[in-house]
Amino acid sequence: MRVSCTRSDPLIAISTGQSNSKGLELKIHPDANEGAVHVGGLSVPFHDTLAPEDSRDTVVLVHGTGGSAKTHFRTLFPMLAARYRVLALDLQSPDGELTLGGLSAQVAAVIDQRAPAQPVHVVGYSLGALVAADLAASRPESVSSLTLVAGWVRADTQQRLRNRIWKQLFESDQDLLREFVTWTAYGHPFLAGRGEADIRALVDARTFPDGIAGQMRLNAVADLSGRLAAITAPSLVIAGAHDQMVPARQTQLLFGGLPNARYAVIDSGHAVPQERPAQLFQLINEFVTDPAAAPAGGIREALFV
Amino acid sequence: MESTPMGYPAPGSPVDVIIVGTGFGGLGMGAKLAREGERSFIILERAEDVGGTWRDNHYPGAACDVPSLLYSFSFRPNPEWSRMFAPQEEILNYLRSVAREENLLERIVFGAELTDARWDEAEALWKVSTPKGEFAAKTLVTAVGHLSEPKMPDIEGLADFSGEVFHSAQWNDGIDLAGKRVGIVGSGATAIQVLPEVAKIAGEVVVFQRSAPYVTPRPDRSYTEEEKGLFRKMPEVMQELREEMFWSNEERYAQRRGTPTLVSAAAQVALDHLHRQIEDPELRRKLTPDYTFGCKRVLKSSDYYPTFTQDHVRLETGGVTRVEGNRVVGGDGGSHELDVIIACTGFEATDLPIAYRIFGRDGQPLSERWANGMQAYATTAVHGFPNLWIINGPNTGLGHNSAVYIAEAQIDYIMAAVTFRDQAAVPALEVSREAEDAFMDRVDQLAQGTVWLDGGCSSWYVDHRNGRLTTLWPEPAYTFRQVNAPFDPEPYLAGSLDEAREEALAGVR
């Protein structure tokens, strides 16, 4: 274990991956059962807090590009686990072309094997939001509510421009890409509120796992146009006000297209689960507790502070 | 600051509300009442100035470890904070300006320590005694804080110490510490602020630590002129920063739920801080906590650890065993001749002294109701004590966020309760015992599995009399407001035997 380092903010330490003093990687939550579900030749890992006689609702977490349950939901998972059974998975990349349908089939397989009895609350973040929407459209009977965080309908020219820069840097200069991704992932207030050492730690912690290039290709071409109107599940659409990867206007189009949606905005960049996990939890928790409580088409106001 | 007597009620003429205390809780309550303008009220203050804990704790280095834009009233944002974490004097001046600009000074009775408050059933009034006279009110709101009564350590021979002894909250400005040999008893939130300042002037300093705290960096800096100008011209920017600070603090709540990944990540931040600032392995070992992160208050300081690297500063890890003349003997055998002892030993947080002075229905003292630990419905109302509401009472502390946010939620509750009562034209509201017990059961449940109960430390968060978490709110701060700010009359009706009263209340439900 590295003893001396430059990070000085708990938030940043949380995003850098954790191991205990023996060097073993800790589970995302002490109550999480870990395992894998096999689907289409892939082994899809899951983290499931299911305990005997736990009759609480199930919340399914679907991470985004380049992430995993642990990197994207490190803080959100335990917060939700205090109130719900939480089931998160690590999306896998097939040898062939990556599609929304292929990814949502992974989610469906995990749900079918781990939580088949009742419809579940699905929370998708970033690319995971598109996967979750695809699932809700193709398997409405499995989804009791749908929360889409920093998602979009179809990449616009701003998003595709960033995607092209990403691709070129991925192929030519991954050190610079780490800086570029850090710059685009977090909101201005979040980055500006940190010291240089903290920013350095964020950059250093950035990794490009296998399959990320395929996910980036999918980000550029994925298209939910025309499919949202068929999604009847109560939905909550959450945008990051300072999101540079998926500008809030793009996320708002999900709200525009979903017939049974509410909208909320968080003062964060794209990295909502890292920048504002507590506020994200508050919004998800209130929505999931009673998805129809707030009227469709309404805007959820931020809590008084 | 002088009190003007024009706001005093004439003897024998009751006011609507008596508030006790002029810290954030009391002044916030007063400001809301004054802005509403519907009710007469006075505020009783035992000292000669406002400010509560921020008036008393004027020791060198005193500051808040919640950033000032968050540690201030939502309805009085202050663009003039000099720094992110303003020093004590600025916070005190902020409270003075609140008292002045919310027109509260004329309603404050200074030098009026509440010595006795009794519920008069026949008149449905609280009768209150103070050195400045007797007062009466329909409603009594106490806002005395849980960090207001200094707790001196129980050390053999301390009373006979041949040098000077004082508590950090009763700082003796008459003693010049320059060149003196000073002992600091304690290593909590106060000690870590006091030590760096005292070490600058004292000839020798010994810290008597019982248990090493977790200390994290304090990301303090001054605000630029441009920032302050922006805050003045666009106050909404202050609100954005306030919300950022609030939600960032809320995230720390997840660490307190005892999730190993988050607890170890947070603890690592503190341990990295220690390793960066202290190189000597022996000193590091002494300053390394032996309990779970977050079980006791997590402290913030960037200059505490470096102070120990100075030659004239020493650390004793076994606390203080006894005092003999001018010699202070530590638990690990170290013994030091000292001129001054500063007790940074905290406050009576679980056994509130004011509870011994409040007598409810049938003359029952609040301290008796609370003999096995504090409890209150919605953290503010106690069965047997009609028309009494308590700010900063049981389960109002936070391990991770701003106490002012909590007080504001309670003030909203009390305003709604009083308004309801007066509209219903009932003389008194008294919460049912059943509702109070059910509320506490719920708090107990929420506290299970938190680091405060399971973290293997002893702290002022837990009442040793019943093992319950009675001072802290065991949930995120935002749920405190959701649970405890909205007023629901129902718990005040259950168990009522008075049919006429029931009907009156039913009419306004």
Image: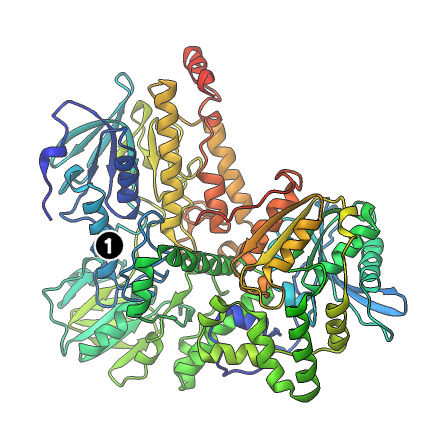
Looking at the image, residue B500 lies above or below residue A287: above
Q: What percent of the width, then of the height, locates residue B118?
A: 25, 28
Residue placed furthest toward the bottom: A172
Residue placed furthest toward the top: B500
- Element type at marker 1? helix
In this rendering, does residue B47 appear at all? Answer: yes
Residue placed furthest toward the front: A157
What's the amino acid at mark 1?
Answer: Tyr
Q: What percent of the width, then of the height, locates residue A188?
A: 49, 69
Looking at the image, residue B477 lies above or below residue B271: above
- Quadrant location of residue A63? bottom right
- Please, which chain is the residue tagged with disc 1 on? B
- Quadrant location of residue A151? bottom right
Q: What percent of the width, then of the height, locates residue A142?
A: 81, 48
- Quadrant location of residue B81? bottom left
Q: Residue at x 15, y 38 (%)?
A: B106
Total labels: the figure holds 1
User: What residue is disc 1 on?
Assistant: B94
Q: Residue at x 14, y 62 (%)?
A: B172
**Within 10 angstroms of label 1, few (less than 14), some, or many (20 or more) residues?**
many
The answer to which of B234 and B413 lies nearer the viewer is B234
In this rendering, does residue A77 appear at all? Answer: no
The answer to which of A8 and A103 lies nearer the viewer is A103
Colour mapping used in the image:
rainbow
- Say left or right for B374 vs B91: right
The answer to which of B253 and A282 lies nearer the viewer is A282
Looking at the image, residue B170 lies above or below residue B266: above
Q: What percent of the width, then of the height, locates residue A183?
A: 55, 75
- Say left or right for A41 vs B415: right
